[in-house]
Image (cartoon, rainbow, N blue to C red):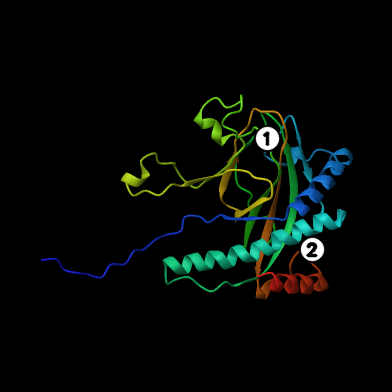
């Protein structure tokens, strides 16, 4: 005789990566500003882990132009959105989840990675360099070589070439037989697309594979600090007036 019994599934979130798109008009503006920046600014590579030998890495200063301010503002809005979405996903899996306690996000640094054939980023994380409760990191792609992941292109040597230029997020070993052992993958591979924006925890290890075709792969990375209500009067580098503007803007975009 079959007996019906109550069943409850307990799931654990390993890591969450939020993916979105930014307007292509903003992408075009960013590329124009970065092109100018590359002619005027020293290479930032000695302060970053990326092995960018054929291209360059450039610091993006928010105060330089309105376009860079838009970038920082977008990253901050996505920071608050990430916190909201994470809490929602957490509540779906466990009753222990709390309401989102973060009231403000501050993007405190960003840089452009202009890479060419053979350039890559070894596995690393970003840490959190400001006294925030926690931090997030992001990547936005603004240029992709036409044949970087084209299966019919001459540079594609095998199916593994489909990872050329991709970013991999890694939080444990990759299992080739995961579904048979009920073992979820600890690795997420994200393919770059112009305008694609991903944001993730600052502690999450990630790497970028090299590619071997002609053309430039350009991405913008940066870090965002998340703050609770008790901290909003003492955020490093943000004045009281700037804080009011940030809170107003973020409340309109969440």
Name the spot of residue 132 as percent of width and height, x first.
66, 63
Q: Is residue 132 something that shows in the picture? A: no
Q: Along the polypeptide, which appears first: circle 2 or circle 1?
A: 1
Circle 1 SS class: loop
**Residue identified by numbered label 1:** 146
Give the side of residue 131 with respect to residue 205, left or right.
Answer: right
Between 191 and 68, the one lying in front of the other is 191
Quadrant position of residue 85: bottom right
- Residue shown at 85%/58% (left/top)? 66
Which numbered marker is on residue 195?
Answer: none
* Residue 87 vertical placement versus 75 (above, below): below
For the C terminus, which image quadrant?
A: bottom right
- Residue 159 position in % (x across, y down): 50, 31
Label for residue 237?
2
Closer to the eye: label 2 or 1: 1
Question: Closer to the camera, 1 or 245?
Answer: 1
Are the residues tagged 2 and 1 within 8 Å (C-beta)?
no
* Left or right: where 178 falls relative to 147: left
Q: Residue at x 76, y 56 (%)?
A: 71
Give residue 233's position: percent from left, percent from top: 74, 74
In front of the other: 72 or 153: 153
Residue drawn 69% across and 35% down? Answer: 145
The answer for how far apart the CA atoms under marks 2 and 1 are is: 40 Å
């Amino acid at each position: 005789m079959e007996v019906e019994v109550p069943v409850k599934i307990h799931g654990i979130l390993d890591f969450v990566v939020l993916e979105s798109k930014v307007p292509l008009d903003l992408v075009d503006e960013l590329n124009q500003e970065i092109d100018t920046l590359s002619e005027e600014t020293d290479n930032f590579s000695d302060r970053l882990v990326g092995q960018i030998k054929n291209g360059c890495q450039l610091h993006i200063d928010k105060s330089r132009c309105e376009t860079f301010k838009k970038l920082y503002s977008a990253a901050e809005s996505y920071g608050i959105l990430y916190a909201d979405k994470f809490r929602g996903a957490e509540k779906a899996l466990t009753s222990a989840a709390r309401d989102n306690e973060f009231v403000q996000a501050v993007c405190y640094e960003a840089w452009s990675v202009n890479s060419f054939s053979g350039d890559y980023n070894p596995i690393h994380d970003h840490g959190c360099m400001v006294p925030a409760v926690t931090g997030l990191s992001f990547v936005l792609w603004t240029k992709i070589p036409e044949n970087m992941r084209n299966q019919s292109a001459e540079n594609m040597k095998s199916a593994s070439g489909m990872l050329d230029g991709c970013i991999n997020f890694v939080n444990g070993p990759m299992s080739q037989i995961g579904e048979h052992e009920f073992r979820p993958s600890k690795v997420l591979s994200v393919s770059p697309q112009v305008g694609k924006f991903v944001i993730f925890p600052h502690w999450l290890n990630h790497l970028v594979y090299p590619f071997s075709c002609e053309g430039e792969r350009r991405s913008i990375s940066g870090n965002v600090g998340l703050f609770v209500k008790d901290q909003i009067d003492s955020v490093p580098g943000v004045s009281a007036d700037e804080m009011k503007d940030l809170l107003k803007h973020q409340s309109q975009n969440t």
